[in-house]
Image (cartoon, grey):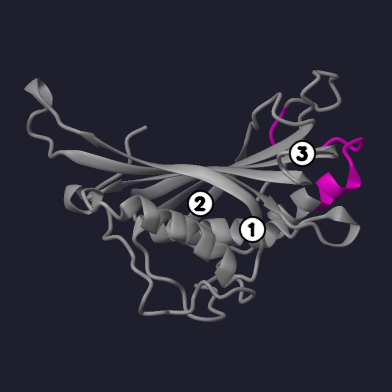
Amino acid sequence: MAAAQGQRSDGAGEMDGSEGKVADSAPLPFRAAVDALRGARLRPEIEIDPTRPPQRLAPYAYALEAAVVEGEEDLADGRLVLLHDPAGHDAWQGTFRLVTLVRAELEPEMAADPLLPEVCWSWLTGAFGARGLSADEASGTVTRAGSHYFGGLSERPPASQIEIRASWTPREGGGGVPDTGAHLAAWCDLLCQVAGLPPVSPGGHGGPGGTGGTGGSGSGDASVVSLPQRRGPLPH
């Protein structure tokens, strides 16, 4: 994985503006948190790259884009943003915040399930719990949308999409640094679950670059419900 970039919201020019770079002047906790993201071991179905983070949300930010890919199909995709404010933030109750967007295309009958939003939110919180992580001050939305095609597109079947937007405060450890690598792995567990992939076996890596054995996302619990795989690539 390429290096990350921190960006100042005040436009002070400390960052060089290219993805994958962190200025030496960035705070040590932020640099350590980014290094932990770089070192995370993820499932082989995950394709992930750094991307330009949003500005003006926090003094320092780093962002990743990821997709669950099987063959040539994108089954789900998302974005994870790490924010850092050394002065702290009242709404965060900490100095770090993680913000995410996850989306996947669904079969219409699955999207019609009235319990789907609650189930998707439980996947988010359950992904943290399975790895023994704390996600404090969590908030977000689960949105489902449907598309019907007409005219020249009338041969296309109806499409439904689920979208999860959320943010949470990772608990800070030694030196004020949260275990962002574990939070990234849990987020990827969520991404795979939304994509309809089965959980990995306990301690399984699934090959080079696969999920590490540090969490419980691969518990194989029969009570965990996965969505069926999508018909095709997500629209962009």
Residues at marks 3 and 1 touching, judged by CB atoms closer than 8 Å: no
Q: Identify the mark at residue 47; answer none if there is no mark.
A: 2
Residues at marks 2 and 1 touching, judged by CB atoms closer than 8 Å: no
Query: Which residue reaches farthest top?
Result: 11
Amino acid carrying mark 2 in the image: Glu
Q: Which residues are magenta?
A: 18-32
Q: Does the magenta portion include 119?
A: no
Q: Which of 207/138 is in front?
A: 138
Q: Earlier in the sequence, mark 3 or mark 1?
A: 3
Q: Which of 131/137 is in front?
A: 137
In the image, taking residue 186 as reference, residue 110 lies left or right, namely left
Q: Split into 4 quadrants, where in the image is the C terminus? A: top left
Locate residue 25, reporting x and y percent: 92, 35
Label 3 sits on a secondary structure element that is: loop
Residues at marks 3 and 2 touching, judged by CB atoms closer than 8 Å: no
Marks 3 and 1 sit apart, C-alpha to C-alpha, by: 21 Å
Q: Does the magenta portion include 24?
A: yes
Q: Earlier in the sequence, mark 2 or mark 1?
A: 2
